[in-house]
Amino acid sequence: MNPSVKIFSGAGSQKLAEKIAKRFGAPLGKISIQKFSDGEFQPIFLESIRGDYVFLVQSTFAPTDNLMELLLMIDAAKRASAYKIIAVIPYYGYARQDRKDKPRVAIGSKLVATLLQAAGANRIITMDLHAPQIQAFFDIPVDHLDSSAIFIPYIEQLKLPNLAFAAPDVGSTNRVREIASYFNSEMVICDKHRKRANEIASMVVIGDVTGRDIVLIDDICDTGGTLARAASLLKEKGASSVRALCTHPVLSGNAYENIENSVLEELIVCDTIPLKKESNKIKVLSVADLFAIAIRNAYENKSITSLFIHSQLRGK
């Protein structure tokens, strides 16, 4: 008898997990997060998972309770004799701490990888890691999904007459170049210099944007300051329109005000992190179909290459 699939959700990704389970074709598993007066909590599976493939959906955005909850869920599943435990992490928190870029700092993304493995995860399914090399921090399989499979159809239906793409910083260059290549479009780079985290000292545009309909592409929108500054600079340099596509809507601090007061036509994000509030300028595209396919392929030992932009580029 083949192991069956059980999909469960942490508190931080409940709505997305419901969509994923629906598209997969299975009910969301029953789990209770028991909370104590001192702030501790304890996940309890309310159904048998012995011998099952257990997929645990939880993005690890702030607060760190979301990460701790996922670790406890993994540990509970291991102790309940699950056959395989797959952590489905649409947004992998602490990914920006991927190297020792100054003395005496932690490498948070490596620590999180170690914790997930120590808790008992057998596989990770995630999307748009801030640095793809984070996959090497794991000694278990990592399926790294690409939001381009969601963003490309959206860009195509916009039918922008003078389409060009922009990287809001040098770190986003490879991501933007792949999509620009798909559309045979030009790309420019907004080179920024920071004084400190979340504070831009200066920014310059490398490339010609005159008369272009610019699409900025990044993996994370945190305070929105970089996008707002880049959009303003691109318009000053002659761009006809500027919009942005960002996978993970962290949207901390004054992000909503920064986006709403910017010259951006719109900000398109994925539902890897739930929005704190609605905004007329922010549109959400769901990753549920992509993760449902990835879960099915992982269960059936099939390739997930077809979910990557590289496959679309080869087939074009």
Image (cartoon, rainbow, N blue to C red):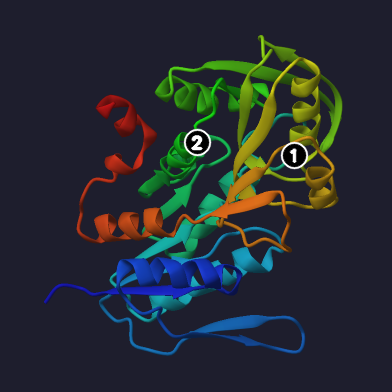
Q: Looking at the picture, how far across and down is residue 207, in whole percent?
A: 66, 10
Q: Which residue extends farthest left?
A: 1
Q: Which residue is drawn at 51% across and 66% down?
A: 16
Q: Find residue 95 and report its image quarter.
A: top right
**Disc 2, SS:** helix
Q: In this view, does 282 lie to the left or right of 143?
A: right
Q: Taking the image as drawn, is residue 110 in sight?
A: yes
Q: Inspect the image, locate mark 2, and give the three-letter code of the amino acid beneath it.
A: Ile
Q: Looking at the picture, how far across and down is residue 92, in whole percent?
A: 56, 51
Q: In this view, does 164 lie to the left or right of 179?
A: right
Residue 139 vs residue 258, the one in the foreground:
258
Q: Find residue 26 and report its image quarter.
A: bottom left
Q: What residue would you read off at disc 2?
A: 155
Q: Inspect the image, locate mark 1, and give the three-letter code of the amino acid beneath it.
A: Val
Instruction: State which quarter of the image contains the N terminus.
Output: bottom left
Residue 260 vs residue 14, the one in the foreground:
260
Residue 56 vs residue 309, the one in the foreground:
309
Q: Looking at the picture, how far across and down is residue 129, in whole percent?
A: 53, 42
> Which mark sits nearer the N-terminus, 1 or 2?
1
